[in-house]
Image (cartoon, rainbow, N blue to C red):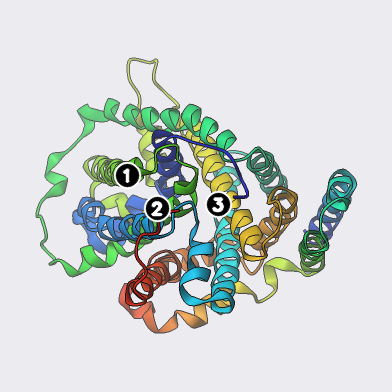
């Protein structure tokens, strides 16, 4: 699972760069930075063993713990 | 405006209907029945409250700041920096919820139909398809909705073929456990209905913005009627067994057998599920990319759609090892998370706008 996610995401990112970069190059610096940052975040996260890494679900569970009793 | 596309109020309505119902309708009756037992059909009526509120707030904000979405409105009302923080919050929330929807979609397709296909492939294909649609702009999405939403709505009528098997006694006794279990059961539909707040991102594209509120409320009416209809049919057919099923609507569709012709209709359900979720995921991804581009004031939203698609894939896997963890999140966290972002924050922004004395601007 882990290697599959990483390899597929890497291929997808390379494809996106290959196809979209010619259009991005003409745009402002802000657009370029936003584009590259998004791809970089996606790529770095795909390095993790995602299903077993604590993340947003745990954060939200902790935040909304006080309300849990209302629906239990 | 980032996307120059124009849609009609009816198209907006057809986009919003699957956005609320596409993922939720499958498991809705059993989640409601676990709290409300045989009063589950009432949850639809009670859940309309947040829908009314969120449509009213979104259209009021659009009256104050025409042609703007909630991201730009919040920057105007509470200042640039707090507005940006809210924009980033909205953006992360939308990407996370999109990931959750993709995961729910995949769990059903791989768990009930495509047993041998790797779930990752199902995730990638739907996200790729939605990203391509989103890059086409709001008009492309609206035209997809015009074709697909009627398929979703009319397929639900096939449930009426079960008419001979209905047992009306399953409804009684009404409210034997009081109103509290029904209120608890409507917490989840409540949160789905508050997704109608997406009207805020669609109103700027309407050819006739005055009709926005009317069609918003009509959509809400259609959604509430559909919720009551599906809950009632499941209850009439399955009775007290409803609560034990993971996907009661799937069970109900499998039960259809008429004259040796209408059989194995669960394949129709899969078709409904795919077209409905395609619209839903596309609209969520569209809203996420628009809020990303508006928060960072980018010149175009299209280049960020595919990178956001990758983030959606990441969020659909992150911290969800199995289906039960997803179910726990949907049951105990989503009923508070979604209304917080979709109802509470917009209500606060509207109240602040009122207190600051912002009147309808004529621009």
Camera-side residue of B146 and A24: A24
Marker disc for residue B223: 1
Q: Which residue is mark 2?
A: B196
Q: Which numbered disc, 1 or 3, marks the residue that appears first in the sequence?
A: 1
Q: Are marks 1 and 3 on the same chain?
A: yes
Q: Are marks 2 and 1 in contact (CB under 8 Å)?
A: yes
Please tell me in which quadrant of the rendered image residue A4 appears: bottom right
Left or right of residue B297: residue B97:
left
Q: Which numbered disc, 2 or 1, marks the residue that appears first in the sequence?
A: 2
Residue at image point 21% right, 27% down: B164
The reply to whether residue B316 is visible in this rendering is: no
Say if B352 sits above or below B34 in the image. below
Left or right of residue A72: residue B110:
right
Q: Nearer the viewer, mark 2 or mark 1?
A: 2
Camera-side residue of B60 and A72: B60
The percent position of residue A11, horizontal first and vertical second, equals 87, 50
Q: Which residue is mark 3?
A: B284
Left or right of residue B232: residue A38:
right
């Amino acid at each position: 699972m882990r290697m599959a996610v990483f390899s597929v995401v890497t291929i997808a990112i390379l494809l996106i760069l290959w196809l979209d970069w010619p259009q991005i190059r003409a745009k402002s610096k802000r657009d370029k930075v936003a584009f590259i940052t998004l791809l970089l975040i996606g790529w770095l996260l795909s390095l993790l063993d995602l299903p077993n890494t604590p993340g947003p679900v745990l954060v939200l569970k902790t935040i909304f713990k006080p309300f849990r009793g209302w629906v239990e | 405006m980032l996307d120059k596309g124009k849609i009609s109020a009816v198209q907006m309505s057809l986009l919003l209907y699957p956005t609320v119902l596409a993922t939720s309708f499958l498991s809705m009756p059993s989640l409601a029945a676990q709290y409300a037992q045989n009063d589950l059909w009432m949850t639809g009526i009670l859940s309309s409250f947040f829908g009314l509120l969120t449509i009213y707030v979104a259209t009021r904000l659009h009256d104050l700041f025409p042609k703007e979405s909630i991201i730009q409105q919040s920057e105007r009302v509470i200042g640039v920096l707090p507005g940006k923080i809210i924009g980033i919050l909205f953006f992360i929330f939308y990407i996370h919820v999109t990931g959750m929807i993709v995961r729910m979609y995949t769990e059903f397709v791989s768990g009930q139909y495509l047993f041998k296909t790797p779930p990752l492939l199902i995730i990638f294909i739907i996200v790729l398809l939605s990203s391509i649609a989103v890059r086409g702009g709001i008009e492309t999405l609206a035209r997809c909705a015009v074709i697909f939403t009627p398929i979703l709505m009319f397929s639900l009528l096939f449930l009426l073929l079960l008419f001979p098997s209905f047992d009306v006694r399953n409804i009684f006794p009404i409210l034997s456990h009081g109103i509290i279990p029904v209120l608890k059961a409507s917490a989840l539909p409540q949160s789905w209905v508050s997704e109608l707040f997406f009207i805020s991102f669609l109103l700027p594209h309407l050819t006739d913005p005055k009709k926005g509120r009317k069609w918003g409320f009509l959509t809400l009416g259609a959604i509430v009627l559909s919720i009551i209809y599906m809950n009632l049919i499941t209850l009439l057919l399955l009775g007290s067994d409803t609560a034990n099923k993971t996907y009661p609507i799937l069970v109900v569709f499998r039960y259809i057998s008429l004259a040796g012709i209408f059989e194995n209709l669960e394949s129709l359900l899969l078709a409904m599920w795919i077209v409905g979720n395609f619209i839903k995921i596309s609209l969520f991804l569209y809203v996420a990319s628009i809020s990303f581009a508006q928060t960072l004031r980018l010149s175009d939203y299209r280049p960020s759609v595919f990178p956001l698609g990758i983030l959606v894939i990441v969020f659909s896997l992150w911290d969800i090892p199995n289906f039960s963890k997803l179910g726990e999140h949907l049951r105990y966290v989503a009923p508070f998370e979604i209304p917080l972002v979709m109802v509470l924050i917009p209500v606060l922004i509207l109240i602040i706008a009122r207190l600051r004395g912002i009147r309808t601007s004529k621009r």
